[in-house]
Each structure stands twice: as structure tokens, then as C-alpha cells.
Image (cartoon, rainbow, N blue to C red):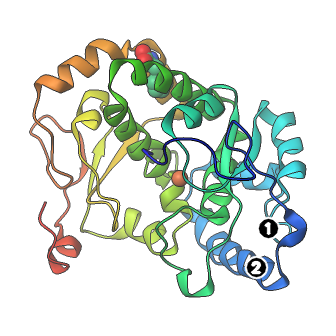
Amino acid sequence: MSYAHGTPPEGAAADWTIPQRWERYSAAEHALWDRLFDRQAKLLPARAAPEFLAGLDVLRLGDSGIPNFDALSERLMNATGWQVVAVPGLIPDDVFFEHLANRRFVAGNFIRTPEQLDYLQEPDVFHDVFGHVPLLANPVFADYMQAYGQGGQRANGLGAIQRLARLYWYTVEFGLIQSAEGLRIYGAGIVSSHGESIFALDDPSPNRVGFDLLRLMRTRYRIDDYQQSYFVIDSFEDLLRQTLETDFAPLYEQVAQLTDIAPADVLPEDRIYTRGTQAYALAKGVAG
Ligand code: PHE
Ligand code: FE
């Protein structure tokens, strides 16, 4: 999340938002969205959390073409009071938190190129909207995201943004959930990635470990490849309850006294679903 600094670029408002300019997308860009959507839509029914799949439906994200943020916001507003607003890309942490705290999700308005179908560094509209927005139609997850924004504003004052960012990473971006049908994916970084949608559930390489707040905040993460560990929540209610009921200030202090945990490490006290072989990471020559 630590993104940009300073003042908004030319053409952006003081809160860094810009017009989506939906009418400016080309036919090829809409077709690329459809291609990405269709590929994930085939894969996800057996893999994604039911709450995510319900959000796709309620928000009609299966309609052809890149969603118009105004129409999308109207549906989302009806469901949970959230909106989607466009930003030029990376924005400062405090601006990001302020938007979330006010139930506004910020999304990039550009779409990747066909060459970037499977990998890109900056989140585009497919990652941001397809990946993040469906769960915002779920009342419990919607409250979690707002609480996260408020928690971010507090963490900012406590110098603890990096620790809090790990919670975002391992839940909002790369979280797994225990559902009635077994493990499911819900993190936006997974559901918007064809490769990781399969890897995160099926590959023997990564660890899959029970969610633990303090443990998560000690765990470094990698931004350049599939995760080496995933954390499993019992339910969105449990995630919301735990994060709301916990005062993070003492937790941040505790984390500051403890060593970081490497992305691939498993601890004796971990609730292990799968102990990974790390074969994938090792083959790529990545150390834990
Ligand atoms: N309870 C957290 C705090 O005391 C705030 C928070 C809520 C953070 C939900 C993340 C998610 O700072
Ligand atoms: Fe994201």
C-alpha cells in the first residue's frame, strides 16, 4: 500500500480521485475485460468464497465490458452503502485510508495490455473491480474494509502502517476461508489471477495456516510472485469480530519487540492446514 506521496497529479481532485472516463475505453479494452472475466468466471464457482460469487451476481459484473463506476456504485450503494471511485494509480496511505473509512473503494481506471494478461505490477481496473468489489457487496466484509480504513488512520499516528499492511495483504489481497465446501479463495490478488486461483488451493508448494492476528503482523510478504504462505479465516464474521474487538496499539508494540517471520516459515504453534513443500519457490531459486 505505501504508494505515492505529495500532491495529486494534474487533473485529479484534492482527494486524488479522477473521472473514470468510461466513454474513452476502446472496443479492444472492453473485449480484454470480457476475456479476463470469462476465464475467471469458469474457474471460480468451485474455488471462490460463496460471498464473493454472490457479489459478482448482485453487482452484475458479468455484464459485457468494463463496468461503468457510476452504475456499479449505484448497485453497491444499494447493497452496502459503498461506492467505487477512480484514482490515477497509486495514492498516499492517508488518502487511501480516508476513502475506505468513508466507504469509498478506490480503483485504477486503466486496463492492462494483452501482453500483461497474467501478470502486471500496478493494479488495473480488472484487479481492482473484479478482485475487490464483489466482496464489498457483503455487509460483513463491507464493515471490515471500513474498519480497516479507520484502523489505518490510527496506525498512521502510531507509526504502524507496515504492520497493518500485512493484515491487508494476508486477508484482503491473499486470504483463504474455510467454507462448508472446504477451503476457498477470497483475496483479490488471488481471485483476479488465473494462475494463483489454482495455485493457492491446489499446489503442494505453499503453506496454508490458520489466521492469527499477531502472527500475520509479524510475517513479511512477497510482492513479485505467488505467496509462500496463505492464512485461512473461519468466516468473515470472525475476521470482523477479532479485528474490531482487538485494540491494535498494544499488538503493534508486541510486534515491534518480536522478530519478523519469513514468508515460507511455519511455527510450532501454527494451526496447519497444509505444510507446503515450497517446491515452486525453490525451483525459482527464492529463499524463504
Ligand atoms: N481494532 C483496530 C485498532 O484498534 C482497528 C482495525 C479494525 C484494524 C479492523 C483492521 C481491521 O486499531
Ligand atoms: Fe488489490
Amino acid type at image mark 2: Glu
Q: Earlier in the sequence, mark 2 or mark 1?
A: 2
SS of the residue under disc 2: helix
Horizontally, residue 230 falls left or right of residue 93, namely left
Is residue 281 visible from the viewing direction of this image? yes
Residue picked out by circle 1: 66
Closer to the camera in the image, 110 or 178: 110
Count of picture labels: 2
Residue 271: x and y in percent read 23, 39
Front-most of residues 189 and 111: 111
With respect to residue 274, does 118 lie above or below? below
**Residue 53 location, quadrant:** bottom right
Residue 79, x across and y down, in percent: 81, 36
The local secondary structure at tag 1 comes to: loop
Crowd rating for badge 2 (residues with CA inside 10 Å; few <14, some 14–19, many 20+): some
Residue 238 in sight here: no
Residue found 18% across the figure and 19% down from its top: 254
Question: Residue 75's spot in the image, x, y percent?
Answer: 87, 44
Q: Nearer the viewer, residue 229 or 146?
A: 146
Q: CA distance from mark 2 to mark 1?
A: 8 Å
- Which image quadrant: the N terminus? top left
Which residue lies under the disc numbered 2?
29
Image position of 245 (left or right of 214)? right
Which residue lies at the image location 70% right of the left edge and 81% below the top edge?
35
The residue located at (14%, 76%) in the rendering is 285
Q: Mark 1 near ligand 2 (CB under 8 Å)?
A: no
Marks 2 and 1 close (CB-CB < 8 Å): yes
Name the kind of residue labelled 1 in the image.
Ile
Query: What residue is drawn where x is 11% and y is 23%?
Result: 257
Residue 283, percent from left and from top: 17, 80
Q: Quadrant of ligand 1?
A: top left
